[in-house]
Image: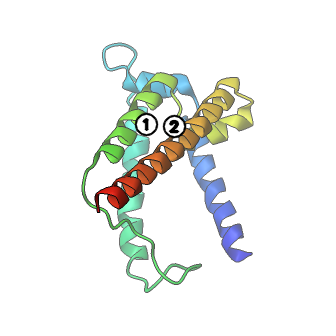
Amino acid sequence: MMRNLAALLIGAVFGTGIAVSGMINPAKVQNFFDFAGTWDPSLAFVMGGALLVTFVGYRLVLKRPAPAFDTSFHLPTKSKLDLPLLGGAATFGVGWGITGFCPGGSIPALGLAEPSALIFIAAMVVGIALARIADNVRQASASIDATTNG
């Protein structure tokens, strides 16, 4: 119960920050990426603030023996750059630049009854499903190859 309440509160704070910063406005985000035209540098300050909070927050939180609502921290263990990571990062960046939405900004934009946010979220869900299917096919293929060649 407390874990879900904490997640709800954190999500509400995050959504409020996204809304206040203007990141739910696709035009504002696209103007940030338009260096040769109507460049709007204000989101650089939003990102800088987020990096500062994250930098300080991680140092404080990771001094604890465990998170408040779990027995251990679940930090990434993979440190290699690989094709799925680079492809995902590129897809995220291109999608954000084209649509003006990232996953974090699109969900609060639903509160404005923004149809383009609904379309973006639907496309994102389909993309996630297709990526999972492709990963399952890749894993099944690797398993079959290991069985037949092993």
Residue count near mark 2 (Cα–Cα under 10 Å), binned few <14, some 14–19, many ≥20: many
Q: Nearer the viewer, residue 118 or 57?
A: 118
Q: Secondary structure at mark 1?
A: helix
Q: Amino acid at mark 2?
A: Cys
Q: Quickly name the residue at label 1.
A: 92
Q: Is residue 20 visible?
A: no
The x and y percentages for residue 10 are: 61, 61
Q: Secondary structure at mark 2?
A: loop
The x and y percentages for residue 108 are: 65, 41
Identify the mark at residue 102; answer none if there is no mark: 2
Q: Nearer the viewer, residue 135 or 61?
A: 135
The x and y percentages for residue 28 are: 50, 26
Task: Tell me the quarter of the image containing the N terminus.
Answer: bottom right
Give the label, 1 or 2, closer to the camera.
Answer: 1
The x and y percentages for residue 21 are: 53, 39
- To which quarter of the image does residue 104 belong? top right
